[in-house]
Amino acid sequence: MNRRHFLKGGTAAATGIVFCSCGLLERAHAQGASRTLPVAVNGKKVKTIDVHAHCHFREAGALLGADAAAVQLPPVNGAAEAFIEIDKRLKAMDGQAVDMEVLSINPFWYGRDRELAGQIVKLQNEKLAELCASKPDRFAAFASLTLQAPDLAVTELETAVKKQGLKGAAIGGIVNGVEFSDPKFDPVWAKAEELGVPLFIHPQGVPELNKRLAGNGWLGNTIANPLETTIALSHLIFEGTLDKFPGLKVIAAHGGGYLPSYADRSDHACMVGPAGCKTDVKLKKKPTEYLNQLYFDSLIFSPEAIRHLAAQVGASQIVLGSDYPYPWQLKPVDHIFACDSLSDDQKVAILGGTAAKLFGVAG
């Protein structure tokens, strides 16, 4: 479809697609007819599970007063739809051929004091549990955690999983300048490993680069978000955190950032520049081998990107992700069907089979 026919058909308006000053047109990669529920692969029905879907609760924002709008309603398409209206969200999920969303809230409370942050997290986890209980076949959720207070986060995670039925926790990419590999967070990772639940890393950007990222192209998100995930995962690997917690389940948003695309460089770094590596950290595996124990969402836009990610980490480590309601990938299921490099069994796993096992939900 050329640009003139695309606009004439009204598709851009219907999907919230916009043109930026750089003149690029956002276009869908998946071709052919859109899938509808129920989804089947070669006659085999599969429960499609989107592990990367967002929401907000106005009650949590009210605890911040005038600051609420800035953190809950950024000036991006789809922001208002994060405040879920059940019927509207279900209609959108049906249109995407998504059976279940695993909801998460990007952390905006790490910089708040312990008491206020704890109140926000408590309210959000209660609201998430209530929402999921109202439609258990359509919604699951990651808990929020007061990660700047690891002792509190441990209690929150245990309560969320054991009493509220939440499926793990969503975390940022760093906490107030402290990397996840810092031993202060070890009790949180130990609790997640003990409970057998995944942690979903969703980046918040790299504000120290804001000066260089200023200008056209929304580089603070376009470049910085994947970069933060890359840094977070690299620290977990190189500082030995994943060796300390070999059973820890981590899901990285946006295909794991840049790490899977240039992973082999990590295997050479300490051989080329040993002065930049710690002699007291003895990794049990090559850095690239740790990627095979992590999980990555499919929000990387093209069949070729999925092919490369699967070649690097294994198709068994990829799960469906859309970033809804933000319109990065409006047809996440079609996107996987467009990947000719995947076998039918691999498509089934990515669309929902792997996530169903991770979250303990019926496939």
Image (cartoon, grey):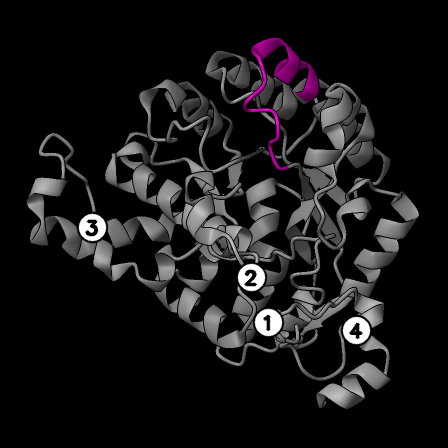
| Residue nearest the viewer, comparing 249 with 1 | 1
**In the image, residue 82 above or below residue 192:** below
Circle nearer the viewer, 3 or 1: 1
Circle nearer the viewer, 1 or 4: 1
Q: Which residue is mark 2?
A: 216
Circle nearer the viewer, 3 or 4: 4
Instruction: Give yes or no for residue 112 being in the magenta stretch.
Output: yes
Disc 3 secondary structure class: loop
The location of residue 154, given as percent across then percent down, is 51, 17
Q: Which amino acid does the dot numbered 3 rest on? A: Lys
**In the image, residue 178 above or below residue 70:** above
Instruction: Give yes or no for residue 82 being in the magenta stretch.
Output: no
Q: Which residue is mark 4?
A: 12
Are discs 4 and 2 less than 8 Å apart at CB? no
Disc 4 secondary structure class: helix
What residue lies at 23% left-to-right and 53% top-to-bottom? 266
First to last magenta residue range: 106-120
Disc 1 secondary structure class: loop
Q: Is residue 97 left or right of residue 328?
A: right
Q: Which amino acid does the dot numbered 4 rest on? A: Ala
Count of residue discs? 4
